[in-house]
């Protein structure tokens, strides 16, 4: 299934996802090249909500730009396999090598606002991330490694404490939704 069909086939879990899915599909229709940053108003990103085998911890990074603990993720940069993007970003941002999707389907979607900021010495104007997220598992015994150009910390955080580490109110809502969805799943 191609990336657009995977978004079209995604079953939203709440009103936020339903509205965001509608707008994401609209953005795909009206903007050229939403898979790359050439689309400066809105473009696709892919994130991973990384859990351990016991499903009681989340692997997070302390993001340099947002100065907050956050999930891993990044720009699609033209790649249509958004799950592969999410997995690549986990590996690059945390140093873990064994990352497995718990499902190949989308786990969550959001439209995230990005404030204007400096990156690599250049100003990046405010824009929207059309965020497609996946649920993946990593081995919490693997050595973690900071990616200095993107984060200043990498750690496993107890799932019930994630929002105590995030200082972004809009992301706390996202993490609460994701944690609720994880807890509803039966992995036995």
Image (cartoon, rainbow, N blue to C red):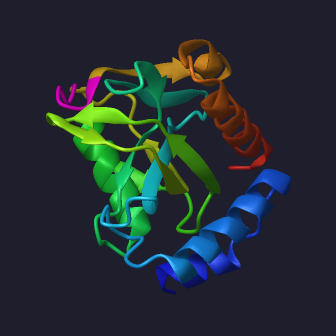
Q: Is residue 87 above or below residue 12?
A: above
Q: Residue sitting at 42 percent across and 25 percent down?
A: 66
| Left or right placement of residue 133 versus residue 181 in this view | left
Q: Is residue 147 magenta?
A: yes
User: Can residue 98 be seen by looking at this rendering?
Assistant: no
Q: Residue sitting at 78 percent across and 52 percent down?
A: 16
User: Can residue 56 be seen by looking at this rendering?
Assistant: yes
Q: Nearer the viewer, residue 73 or 51?
A: 73
Percent across and percent down for residue 138 are 41, 41
The part of the chain drawn in magenta is 146-151
Which residue occupies the extreme top position in the image?
164
Percent across and percent down for residue 113 are 54, 43
| Left or right placement of residue 145 versus residue 64 in this view | left
Q: Is residue 162 magenta?
A: no
Q: Residue sitting at 47 percent across and 76 percent down?
A: 31
| Left or right placement of residue 8 versus residue 54 in this view | right
Which image quarter: residue 43?
A: bottom left
Which residue occupies the extreme right position in the image?
15
Main SS class of the magenta portion in the image = loop
Q: Nearer the viewer, residue 22 or 181?
A: 22
Percent across and percent down for residue 134 are 53, 55
Q: Is residue 170 above or below residue 133?
A: above
Q: Residue sitting at 60 percent across and 35 percent down?
A: 55
Percent across and percent down for residue 97 are 25, 45
């Amino acid at each position: 299934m191609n990336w657009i069909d995977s978004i079209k086939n995604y079953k939203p879990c709440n009103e936020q996802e339903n509205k965001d899915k509608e707008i994401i599909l609209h953005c795909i229709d009206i903007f050229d090249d939403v898979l790359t940053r050439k689309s400066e108003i809105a473009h696709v990103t892919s994130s991973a909500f990384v859990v351990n085998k016991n499903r009681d911890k989340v692997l997070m990074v302390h993001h340099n730009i947002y100065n907050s603990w956050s999930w891993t993720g990044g720009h699609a940069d033209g790649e249509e396999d958004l799950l592969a993007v999410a997995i690549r970003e986990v590996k690059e941002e945390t140093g873990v090598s064994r990352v497995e999707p718990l499902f190949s389907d989308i786990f969550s979607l959001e439209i995230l606002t990005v404030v204007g900021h400096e990156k690599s010495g250049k100003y990046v104007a405010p824009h929207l991330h059309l965020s497609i997220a996946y649920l993946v598992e990593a081995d919490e015994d693997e050595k973690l490694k900071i990616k200095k150009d993107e984060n200043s910390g990498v750690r496993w955080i107890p799932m019930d404490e994630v929002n105590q580490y995030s200082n972004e109110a809009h992301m706390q809502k996202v993490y609460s939704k994701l944690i609720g969805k994880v807890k509803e799943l039966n992995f036995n």
